């Protein structure tokens, strides 16, 4: 997975609670996204939603990406998901996904 070509560090929101500049956050995200681990696969977009047969996702699949109806349904996902983070995290664990980060990170305290 790579960052979108048109993404510029100035478009990244400032996060004062992390005491990092937008440029630092952009560079950190760029490194994190570009670090595949040998022998592992990345989570595919909406894999969970399709696996649990989320009714909103099923409607989105039927409408097709880029349509007005699809975009309206996507807004439901973004702001009012019918599933919980708890459910998603446990699904990830059950499917064998792991969340990793480098051990020696000086920019994260």
Image (cartoon, rainbow, N blue to C red):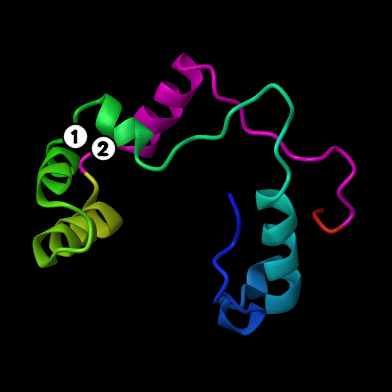
Q: Residue at x 53, y 17 (%)?
A: 96
Magenta stretch: give its range: 82-106
Asked if residue 21 shows in the view, the reply is no
The residue at which mark 2 appears reads as 83
Q: Position of residue 100 (x, y in %)?
A: 69, 34
| Numbered disc in front, either 2 or 1 | 1
What's the residue at 19%, 34% (across, down)?
Answer: 54
Q: Relative to residue 27, is residue 93 depicted above or below?
A: above
Judged left or right of residue 37, residue 79 is: left
Residue 15, can we see it? yes
Based on the picture, tell me whether residue 29 belongs to the magenta stretch: no
- Tell me the chief SS of the magenta region: loop
What is the distance, in whole Å, between disc 2 and disc 1 at their CAs? 8 Å
80 relative to 34 in the view: left or right: left
Q: Position of residue 80 (x, y in %)?
A: 22, 53
Q: Nearer the viewer, residue 68 or 97?
A: 68
**Residue 104 percent coordinates (x, y):** 90, 43
Picture quadrant where residue 85 is located? top left
Q: Which residue is mark 1?
A: 54
Question: In the displayed structure, would residue 2 be above or below residue 27?
Answer: above
Percent of width and height locating residue 101: 74, 39
Label 1 crowd bin: few (<14), some (14–19), many (20+), radius 10 Å: some
Left or right of 39 on screen, residue 48: left
User: Helix or strand or loop: what does disc 1 sit on?
Assistant: loop
Please report whichever mark, 2 or 1, sits nearer to the chain's N-terminal start: 1
Residue positioned 90% across, 54% down in the render: 106
Mark 2 near mark 1, Cβ–Cβ under 8 Å? Answer: yes
Q: Using the rendered view, name the quadrant where residue 14 is placed.
A: bottom right
Q: Secondary structure at mark 2?
A: loop
Residue 89 painted magenta = yes
Residue at x-position 40% and y-position 23%? 91
């Amino acid at each position: 997975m790579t960052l979108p070509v048109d993404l510029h560090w100035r478009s990244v929101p400032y996060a004062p609670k992390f005491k990092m500049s937008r440029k630092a956050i952009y560079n950190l995200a760029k490194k994190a996204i570009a670090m595949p681990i040998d022998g592992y696969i990345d989570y595919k977009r909406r894999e969970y939603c399709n696996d649990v047969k989320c009714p909103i996702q099923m409607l989105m699949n039927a409408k097709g990406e880029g349509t007005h109806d699809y975009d309206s349904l996507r807004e439901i996902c973004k702001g009012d998901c019918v599933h919980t983070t708890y459910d998603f995290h446990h699904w990830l664990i059950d499917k064998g996904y792991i969340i990793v980060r480098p051990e020696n990170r000086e920019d994260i305290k």
